[in-house]
Structure formats: C-alpha cells, structure tokens
Amino acid sequence: MNFFLPKQVVRAIDALEAAGYAAYAVGGCVRDQVLGIMPHDYDVCTAASPEEMQRVFENQRTIETGLKHGTLTVLMGGMPLEITTFRQDGDYLDGRHPETVRFTRRVEDDLSRRDFTINAMAYSPTRGLCDPFGGREDCAAGIIRCVGVAEKRLEEDALRILRALRFSARLGFPIEEHTARAIHEGKAGLLRISTERISSELNGLLLGGHAGEVLAEYPDVLGTVLPLRLLTGHEVDWPCSLRRIDYAAPDLAIRWAALLLDAGLETAGVLRALKMPVKLTENVSHLVRECRALDRDVPMQEMLMRLGPDQLRQCLLLRQADRVVRQPDQKETIEADTREKLREAEMLIQGNACCTLGQLAVNGRDMAALGLKGKAIGQTLNALLLAVVRSEIPNEKEALMKRAASMQA
Ligand code: CTP
C-alpha cells in the first residue's frame, strides 16, 4: 500500500526515530489513506515521553496545551502537528475524560484504547503499517467495529456512540452486530456528554451520505440526543424526515431543515437547545418556514426578497427533497421543475432584480419629503418593496412616490 505523508510529518517522525523513539502517523489519517480518501489532518504518536519530545523538538516552536495528556503541538515548517505519547488511558470515571493518563512504550497498547478498528492503525515510513486489530480488513469489508469489548469502549466515552453513527453515515459502512447492540444498550451514556460535543458529532453525522439510513436504524439514539420534549404536539413523520435527509443536498442547513421540517416553529428551539450557532439556527428556521411558502406558489421575486439569494437556493433544494420523498414516482418531474425554478431564481439574482430596500428607487429621504415620519417611513418603504416585488408597480421613482402619496391619503 502506498502511503503519502506530508514532508513535515515525515520530518517529525524521523526526528523522533533518530533520537531512539518509535513514532507513527496514527488514527484518522491512516484510516483515510487505507480507504483511498485524502486525509484532512495528520496526528503522530510516539514512544517518547512529553519531556523527551520537548528535548527532541527544542529547536522548534511548540505549544504545550495538551502536555498533561501527553500531547505536544509542534510547528513543523508552519504546520501545527499534534504529537502524543503512546497512552494507555486509565478509567474514564465520568464517561468522558480519562481520570489518569498512563504512558506506555508500546504502540499496540496505544492502539488498544482507541474506539474502532478502522481508527486503530498506525503507520511509519520505516516500520510500515501496525494493525493489531484488523483495521485494514474492516476497511476492506466496510465495517465499523469497536476495538475489543464494545461495551467497555463506549462506556469510556459515550460520544463514541455518535462517532460510530457518523462514520457509518459518512462511509456507508454498517455497524458490526456487537458494537450495534452496545450502542443501543449504552445510549443513555450520551446524557452525560456535553451538548457542544454532541452537536458537533450530529453535524458531522447529518452531512454523511447515509445519515438518514443510519438514523433510521438507531431512532433510540436520535431520541436520546434530540430534545424531543420540544416537539410534543407536532406530528413529525420521522421515517419521511430521515428519507428527506438522504435525498437533500449535503449542506448543513438544508440537512437540519430536512430533519426538522415537520417541527415548524419549534425548529429554532431544538437547535438552540443543542447550542448550535445562531447563524445556523436562523438559517434553518428560515428554510423550514419558507419552504411552505414555496408550496403556496409565492412569486419567485417575493421569495428572493424573503430569503436572499443563498437561502432561496437552499429552500428550493429543500422543497425538492420534500416533494421527491413524498412522491417518489414523480422524481423526474419534480427535479425538472426544481431546475426550472433554480434557473428562474438565478436569472432574477443575476439580473439584479429588486428584492431589498436598498435597491428601491426611493429612500427614506424621499418619504420624509412626503411628510412621513418615524416608523411610517420604514412601513411605507416595505409596502412599496412588496408592491414592486409582486410586479404591481415598476421600480421607478415617479410611480413609487405616487403610490406612497396615495397610501397616505
Ligand atoms: N479517538 C478515540 N475515541 C474518541 C475520539 C478519538 O479512540 N472518542 C481516537 C481514534 O483513534 C481517532 C483518533 O483518536 O482516529 C483521532 O480522533 P479525531 O481527530 O477526533 O477523529 P478522526 O478519527 O481523525 O476522524 P475525523 O477527523 O475524520 O473526524
């Protein structure tokens, strides 16, 4: 197998090896390469203790934030690289953080405390692949399997339950039977995990190409992490919502809106409870609200005014997903209709169609000149914009002033 390691990673591994310490690239970057995917970052692990690492890299800039847990960040040619001493973690008493960190000189020990076989491989340019738990085989077969006893791995860090679902959704790999059972049985452990960590995993999961499919197999896990109490009184068709996710474009706001479309106004509450970023929350609730407006055939220029260009595109794609899932036999017609609508929207956007107050041929000063004051100015401008957007009047100063004056009469 041909492994590629950036030269900064090779230099760090070489420096450690030259000082007599075994060193490997480890975790996600090895998994991705075995799977033929380009890794997005590289981690290194080594037999050197934190102090020994510091001596090896004394001429490099280093950041010591994770030193207590054995991690030193070394700036190799400008690239921050996390290097961690081989660890054999102690008991995770709170199900989150290891209470004690025990260092070890054996890479196999370090790999044995990792979550899944596909993540428990290490690679060194001189030592080759270290794969004591059959990670390569599971990559080839396409299986997510815990290292060792699944219950124990998931108890140590219950977030691993969502990680398993995320990898399954992203890679399209089923979860092995024992691991799956341990997930169902251990899901309550997620209640001890911080909302931020859960949300970040959920976001990753939702972006996977098989997210809906995976969640359909683990509705109990979804029920544990989503604040469902906020949805009482809403008829959420979960099977349909999950199918909608897999059809929807892999865009975080669209995927969340696909999941929460039936939740209507409660969507914002659900995302706030999950401590999602305000921008995402607003984006998703906008899409959920306005998707129904598209059903009512509100004119495209008015939709552009209500949503802006980016959200309008998202909304059209969301609605497409919703319609296709409800009428799968109409898929082709619905897709053609969406293409047509996207084209219509694009023409309006490119043609700089009036859809904001700033594009209106009159402004606040013009309204003041008509004798309007305070709130009335904004209200009149908004009414004029709506009239323009609905093609009732042209966006020309004379026509707009006349309409504004008549509105006062
Ligand atoms: N790991 C673990 N248990 C966790 C988190 C991480 O055992 N709860 C180990 C795994 O070996 C994992 C490595 O730490 O491969 C790095 O974790 P992380 O950077 O979170 O994810 P990656 O596996 O690199 O995957 P990705 O970056 O694609 O999410």
Image (cartoon, helix red, strand yellow):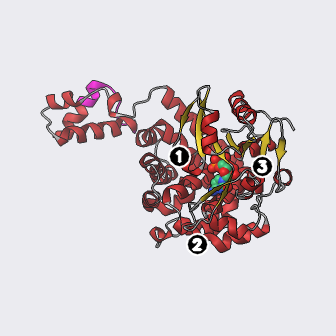
In this rendering, the answer to whether 222 lies above or below 32 is below
Q: Amino acid at mark 2?
A: Ala
Q: Are marks 1 and 2 in contact (CB under 8 Å)?
A: no
Q: Is residue 302 visible?
A: yes
Residue appearing at x 73%, y 50% in the figure? 105
Q: In front here: 68 or 282?
A: 68
Q: Amino acid at mark 1?
A: Cys
Label 2 – label 3 distance at C-alpha: 29 Å
Q: Which mark is residue 121?
A: 3
Report the magenta residues as a range: 390-401
Of mark 3 and mark 1, the one earlier in the sequence is 3
In this rendering, the answer to whether 364 lies above or below 101 is above
Label 3 – label 1 distance at C-alpha: 42 Å
Label 1 – label 2 distance at C-alpha: 35 Å
Point out the frontmost of discs 1 and 2: 2
Residue tagged 2: 188
Q: In front here: 261 or 210?
A: 210
Categorize mark 1 by other alpha carbons within 10 Å: few (<14), some (14-19), many (20+).
many
Q: In front here: 384 or 102?
A: 102
Residue appearing at x 58%, y 69% in the figure? 189
In the rendering, at what x and y percent does residue 30 appear?
76, 43
- Element type at marker 3? loop
Residue tagged 1: 315
In the rendering, at what x and y percent does residue 27 appear?
71, 47
